[in-house]
Every structure is written in structure tokens, then in C-alpha cells.
Image (cartoon, rainbow, N blue to C red):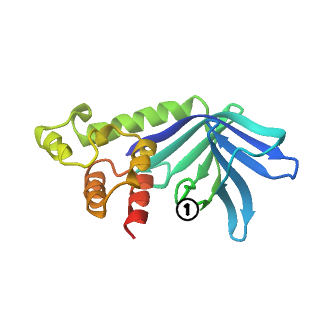
Amino acid sequence: MAATVQLRGRYELFETRNHNRILVLDRDRWYAWVQGEQGEVLVRSDPDHERQRTLQDGEYYLVDFTNDPRFTDLPHLFLQRGERFQEVILPNGLPTDDDVQKKVILADATVDMDELPEYLEAAETDGRARAGSDGERTEDEAAEEKELPIPGFRDFSVRDAMARLDDMSEEDLRRLRSWEVEHKQRKSLLQQIDRRLR
């Protein structure tokens, strides 16, 4: 099993005067949480919302799981609610500038506040162990990585990597995709690369 924490920080879910729910991650990512025709969705938004009242706030984790016995292999957003984390499944990741609306599945399960960080740390450690001894690069891996169009790509967060994709050629995107599939398998990043290759 493996888990990759893509984002971690503080969030707020508040209600506007018009009774709209707004999710804010780290004070710089804004999403309207709305009831769509086929269920709940997050819609990319901006900070021009007036708070009526805070519904909940606290820590959050955005995590990709791979072969995990407890969580499906889809991006998960964990939102702190009191002493527990609410599990929210994002089948297609968070909304982006190119794809502003994404489905949200609110799971019935919650995870104890102390248990989640420990579980994620163990899963990340397990994933690194499977990738190689303590995640160290072999000589072949280091040479292969030097051929990538983005120096140091292996250590980029998904957010940092996505910020560089728009300026890349189709050939470079394909090289990055091949490397990502063989090494880290970060689903949200692969989805963004695939979207640009269409």
C-alpha cells in the first residue's frame, strides 16, 4: 500500500448570505460546494464571497492512495470535524482552471484525528520502501531523471508540477507521463497530463 499526501494545511467551510457553501483551502483555493444534477460537486471559485457563518474549519489532507486496503485508489480529501476527519472522495481530483467542476462523494466514514496522520505516515513509508531503499535514486534512475524536461521533477509536489505543464510540448508531456507511471503514479498529476495530451 502507498499514500501520497498532495496537499496539507488549514481549511474553512462557510456559508454565504445566499446560503451557498464555500470551501477554502489554505486561504488561496476557493470552491463552491453545490448540489448538482447528479450529486454534490466542487466548482472552482474566487475569494469574492461574504461569510455569513463558518460551518466548520480545521486541518485538511489531500491524499492519493495506491493499493490501500482501507481507502479506494482515488484522491481523498480529509476535513477535520472536531476530533475526527471526514472522508471526502474526489473521483477526478480537485477542480482546476481547465476543469472547473468536479464531483464530490461524502463518505459515511470518519477517521480519528490522531489516527489519520499516523496511518498516512506509515503508508508513505511503505510506498517509499517499495520504490527502493529509503527512496534513494539508483544510478539508472538518476540518469533517467536527468533526461526529463523539468530538473528535479521527482521532488516536485503535484501542485508545483501542474504549474509547469501548460508550457510543455506534447513530447515533453509524454516523457513526464512515462516517468510518472513508472515511479510515483500520482493520479491527479497523470489526469492533468492526460488532459493536456487530448
Per the image, the residue denoted by label 1 is 99
124 w.r.t. 101: above or below: above
Q: Count the marks: how many?
A: 1
Q: Position of residue 155 (x, y in %)?
A: 33, 37
- Under circle 1, the secondary element is loop
Q: Which residue occupies 29% across, 54% down?
A: 176
Residue 110 seen anywhere in this rendered image of the structure: no
182 w.r.t. 38: above or below: above
Q: Nearer the viewer, residue 177 or 126?
A: 177
Drawn side of residue 144 relative to residue 102, left or right: left
Q: Nearer the viewer, residue 68 or 56?
A: 56
Q: Position of residue 130 (x, y in %)?
A: 27, 42
Drawn side of residue 88 relative to residue 168, left or right: right
> Looking at the rendering, which quadrant does residue 158 occupy?
top left
Residue 87 seen anywhere in this rendered image of the structure: yes
Q: Amino acid at mark 1?
A: Asp
Q: Which residue occupies 66% across, 60% down?
A: 41
> Looking at the rendering, which quadrant does residue 194 occupy?
bottom left
Q: Around disc 1, counting alpha carbons within 10 Å, would you say few (fewer than 14), some (14 to 19), or many (20 or more)?
A: few
Q: Which residue occupies 58% across, 53% down?
A: 89
